[in-house]
């Protein structure tokens, strides 16, 4: 049985919402999410999706992603260092086993990690509850062992979900999911237990979309990032907004792209007085503590609270 | 094996159209339309509000914007929903700031779900149109007998319950069956946004009454240009404004014409696109020769 509407959150019009004032009175919470991924050379098969678009081994695609970890990651990390920005890493947690040097470098910089599954070539489609619990538990334990951090965020591997995914991470005391794209502000997710929010991540300004799917030029990507930031900053004065730049070193760190990307970062840094530079868990933690209740009250006051929970299939 | 003999017979091969909905009429013979207040070009802004279900059937084809990955495709469900939650309010604000009116076709299933949005649209003085039951209910000639009439009746009932009496209909994906026009006429709709056989409204005759075609440009569709053809925001904007410029230049010869174009909320309402949307709206609002109007107003003015 499938559903037309996942009921993971209530409709909530972006007008006359209670204002979010970020720490320090900032208008916009800004975070950068480098995806640090490992794609397997010969992935196990999933009935819902092929491991690679072409028959394995897809050597060009595989080696480009390997380049991202060998070369690209370090270039991107140094660029973020230059502007004092800490990454929130969307991590395929097997990377802790494959490339611990990267994990150590991120830990040294006090970067945050959140789970992006085990490998980007292992999908959630078709998993039973025990299997999905296993990959969540694996992620928590693996990152804790490698970094000492308890992860609080989740982005399903390759954006593959089951109907249970968000209930399971909420039950495991995750604070935020990056899997929902319905807003430029956070919102409580209707899970069976826990206190989970949807945190604005982005596909529209995500380099895997702009470079990978849409084939944009570096100059165009920079232009879009600037325009996106300008609009959200302007609105943030009224509403309090979130902007994330999700990145993949195998794309953005290419020698012909990292320079133009720096121009976008410079533009953002030029408005530093109005921007809260934070990590995913910092934004989610602040929202859970200061904005959760006002949001729920506003949704109810606007007559938009429908009850139930995500994929509740009509059950209360 | 050859094709049947009647494949080379042409029963409608004669002067004019091959259907009876409306006669052939070249632009050169079209009576000149005069828009109100001496305006020489009309602009019709269409903001389509769609519900894209998580489990679409996709028959006979997937509606533009439908789910793409294995169920549950939360990625596409939520990016479409963004338009109805956030993007459309940016568009409403931009219209209001310039005193411009638009038409908002809305899937009937959204009427209750997004009630605060419906109220905001009405408060802004905009026109609403019926946009079928939902995006996944595509009207086509392969539907079983009675299904299409049931969908249209159910849609009209939902608008009635919401206290709305739209005159205009747009079909999901602008797809019709051979019966659609008569069925919507029977349900009390006398304007349709699916047909664009002219750049002015055209009356179409059905067994159940007249339905006016109000031209909405497929070739200026923002979703197609920006997300399928991957043109830049500025390329899209330049084309909309160029169409207006040309209609103004043609006004002496051809009278008033209409540029109908979409602002799809989950596409044009994204933060990075709004600067360009504002440029287009400025181009309309700041041009004394341009009449940006609601759909019914345009049809009434064309009817004369």
Image (cartoon, coloured by chain):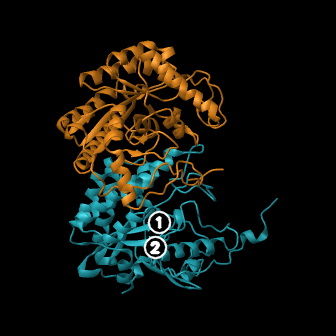
* Residue A314, image x, y percentages: 59, 55
Where disc 1 sits, the SS reads helix
At x 54%, y 36%, the residue is: A168
Q: How many marks?
A: 2
Q: In the orientation shown, which residue stands out farthest toward the right?
A: B1
Among the two numbered marks 2 and 1 on one chain, the one whose residue lies closer to the N terminus: 1
Q: Are the two marked residues, 2 and 1, in contact with CB atoms closer than 8 angstroms?
A: yes
Q: Examine the rendering and report whether any part of residue A121 can be seen.
A: no
* Marks 2 and 1 share the same chain: yes
Residue under label 1: B112
The answer to whether residue B94 is left or right of residue A98 is left
At x 20%, y 71%, the residue is: B288
The answer to whether residue B252 is left or right of residue A171 is left
Q: Is residue A4 above or below residue B103?
A: above
- Which label is found at residue B183? none
Q: Give the image quarter of residue B60.
A: bottom right
Q: Which of B91 and A288 is in front in this view?
A: A288
- Which label is found at residue B162? 2
The answer to whether residue A96 is left or right of residue A240 is right
Colour orange maps to chain: A
């Amino acid at each position: 049985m499938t559903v037309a509407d996942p009921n993971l959150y209530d409709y909530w019009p972006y007008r006359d919402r209670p204002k979010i004032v970020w720490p320090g009175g900032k208008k916009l919470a800004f975070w950068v999410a480098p995806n640090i991924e490992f794609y397997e050379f010969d992935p196990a098969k999933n009935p819902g999706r092929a491991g690679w678009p072409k028959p394995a081994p897809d050597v060009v695609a595989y080696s480009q992603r390997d380049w991202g970890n060998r070369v690209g990651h370090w270039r991107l990390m140094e660029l973020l260092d230059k502007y004092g920005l800490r990454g929130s890493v969307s991590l395929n947690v097997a990377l802790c086993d494959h490339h611990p040097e990267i994990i150590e470098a991120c830990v040294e910089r006090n970067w945050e990690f959140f789970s992006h599954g085990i490998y980007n070539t292992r999908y959630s489609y078709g998993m039973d509850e025990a299997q999905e619990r296993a990959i969540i538990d694996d992620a928590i334990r693996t990152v804790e062992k490698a970094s000492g951090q308890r992860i609080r965020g989740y982005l399903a591997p390759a954006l593959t979900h089951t109907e249970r995914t968000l209930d399971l991470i909420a039950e495991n005391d995750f604070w935020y999911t990056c899997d929902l794209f319905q807003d430029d502000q956070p919102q409580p997710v209707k899970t069976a237990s826990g206190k989970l929010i949807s945190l604005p991540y982005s596909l529209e300004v995500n380099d895997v979309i702009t470079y990978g799917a849409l084939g944009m030029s570096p100059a165009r990507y920079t232009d879009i990032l600037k325009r996106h930031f300008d609009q959200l900053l302007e609105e943030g004065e009224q509403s309090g907004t979130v902007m994330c730049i999700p990145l993949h070193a195998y794309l953005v760190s290419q020698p012909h792209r990292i320079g133009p990307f720096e121009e976008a970062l410079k533009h953002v840094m030029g408005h530093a007085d109005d921007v809260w530079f934070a990590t995913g868990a910092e934004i989610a933690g602040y929202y859970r503590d200061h904005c959760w209740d006002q949001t729920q009250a506003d949704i109810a006051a606007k007559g938009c609270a429908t009850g139930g929970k995500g994929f509740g299939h009509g059950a209360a | 094996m050859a094709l049947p003999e009647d494949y080379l017979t042409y029963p409608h091969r004669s002067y004019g159209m091959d259907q009876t909905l409306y006669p052939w009429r070249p632009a050169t013979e079209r009576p000149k339309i005069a828009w109100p207040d001496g305006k020489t070009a009309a602009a019709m802004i269409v903001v389509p509000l769609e519900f894209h279900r998580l489990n679409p059937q996709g028959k006979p084809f997937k509606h533009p914007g439908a789910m793409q990955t294995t169920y549950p495709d939360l990625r596409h469900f939520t990016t479409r929903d963004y338009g109805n939650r956030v993007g459309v309010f940016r568009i409403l604000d931009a219209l209001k700031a310039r005193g411009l009116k638009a038409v908002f076709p809305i899937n009937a299933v959204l009427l209750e779900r997004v009630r605060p949005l419906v109220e905001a649209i009405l408060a802004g003085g905009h026109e609403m149109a019926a946009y079928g039951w939902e995006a996944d209910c595509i009207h086509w000639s392969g539907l079983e007998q009675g299904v299409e009439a049931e969908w249209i009746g159910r849609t009209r009932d939902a608008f009635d319950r919401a206290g709305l009496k739209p005159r205009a209909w747009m079909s999901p994906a602008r797809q019709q069956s051979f019966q659609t026009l008569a069925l919507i006429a029977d349900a009390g709709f006398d304007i349709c946004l699916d047909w664009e056989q002219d750049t002015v409204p055209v009356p179409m005759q059905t067994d159940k009454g007249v339905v006016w075609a109000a031209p909405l440009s497929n070739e200026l569709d923002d979703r197609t240009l920006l997300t399928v053809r991957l043109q830049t925001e500025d390329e899209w904007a330049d084309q909309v404004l160029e169409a207006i410029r040309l209609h103004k230049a043609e006004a002496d010869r051809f009278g008033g014409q209409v540029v109908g174009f979409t602002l799809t909320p989950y596409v044009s309402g994204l933060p990075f696109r709004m600067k360009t949307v504002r440029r287009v709206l400025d181009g309309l609002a700041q041009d004394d020769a341009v009449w940006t109007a609601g759909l019914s107003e345009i049809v009434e003015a064309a009817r004369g």
